[in-house]
Image (cartoon, rainbow, N blue to C red):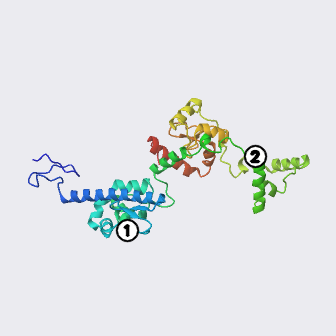
Amino acid sequence: MNRNYCLYCGKKIPVDYNFHATYCSKTCINKARWLRRRDSVLEKQKIKRINKKINSPKRYCLYCGKEINKLEHPNKVFCSKECSKNIYIHNRTKKKYLMDKDFLYQKYIIEECSSKDIAPIFGCSYATVISRLIEFGISRRVTGVAPHPERVILKIKKARERQNGENHPRFGLKNSPEQKRKFRATMIARGNMPIKEKNPMWGKHHTKETKDKVRKIFLEHKVSQLENNPNWQGGISFKPYDKKFNSHFKDIILERDDYKCLYCGIDNFSAKKLYKQGLHVHHIDYDKMNTTKKNCCALCCKCNIRANYHRLAWTKYYHWLLNWLYGYEYAN
């Protein structure tokens, strides 16, 4: 046997095939050729983006990289017809080798590129991209469905890198009374009066007699008290917390979540300055006696209040998120 190995699949090449061969079959040759062409197309697309940003008369060919005078040929992208043919003429049998599952997964799901954006990379229509997604078993994006976990983690990282707290350019600055007067004058000129002045009781106060009358009516009819309140949920707020739910347990949960809100990504230091409160430890299934690492996560006060509505949806969301981040398993 020969010591040569295939450069694409890694199999040994027999001597009978060819002593100087570098690939074991024609399929490996085609795959390697089209993978090289894919990389070259991606590099040429980067050049195209750079040309759009730079306001210079120079432009580069998308295939060979030669300079094209932008003033003489404003709409020209290739230097010759041969370069345009080399990119856009492909065999349908070879497009399958060009489209890898990992590359489509990275572009379509993680980077959120559409099929129309991916099609020019391979020199085909967006319908062929969709057919390859179905062949590889990659689920298509549909509106109303929960996002992919990797995409959620990317959004959390981006939210953490945003201008929060001290990074914000207006941090520690306050509007002067002159600026407030200007804002008020523009609101009045546009017809958008402040909410306070729209209220008929603006600048007025109730007397003691009216306050006593309102109190008597509320006490007699028991309006918005306990069971009469539309948000009544059986007196959950009066129930005590578990003894395990102490400061030590809260510190463990905050350390696990890196002292940052799992939904919006704000950290503990900036949350104290914005909301005048630190991060909360939220019970995912809303059971105060179920104090476990599976059932608790770090949230800011704003996201914790938001989770009080549509509770079933939020429990599913946080179960799914903790399962992806930490590997916790939950019963359906």
Q: Which residue is mark 1?
A: 125
Residue 33 at x, y percent in the picture: 25, 58
Q: Residues within 10 Å of mark 2 (few under 14, many from 20)?
A: few
Compare marks 2 and 1 and give the one earlier in the sequence: 1
Residue 161 at x, y percent in the picture: 53, 44
Q: In the image, what residue type sits under mark 2?
A: Ser
Closer to us: mark 2 or mark 1?
Answer: 2
Residue 243 at x, y percent in the picture: 59, 31
Residue 4 at x, y percent in the picture: 15, 48
Q: In the image, what residue type sits under mark 1?
A: Ser
Front residue of 319 and 22: 22
> Residue, x 39% and y 66% (percent of image)?
77
251 displayed left or right of 34: right
> Residue, x 88% and y 47% (percent of image)?
212
Front residue of 281 and 190: 190
Q: CA distance from mark 2 to mark 1?
A: 57 Å
Q: Which residue is mark 2?
A: 176
Q: Residues within 10 Å of mark 1 (few under 14, many from 20)?
A: some
- Res. 130 visible in picture: yes
Q: Judging from the image, what secondary structure is the residue with disc 1 in?
A: loop
64 displayed left or right of 326: left
Q: Please say if 40 is above or below 125.
A: above
119 displayed left or right of 154: left
Q: Quadrant of residue 167?
A: top right
Q: Judging from the image, what secondary structure is the residue with disc 2 in?
A: loop
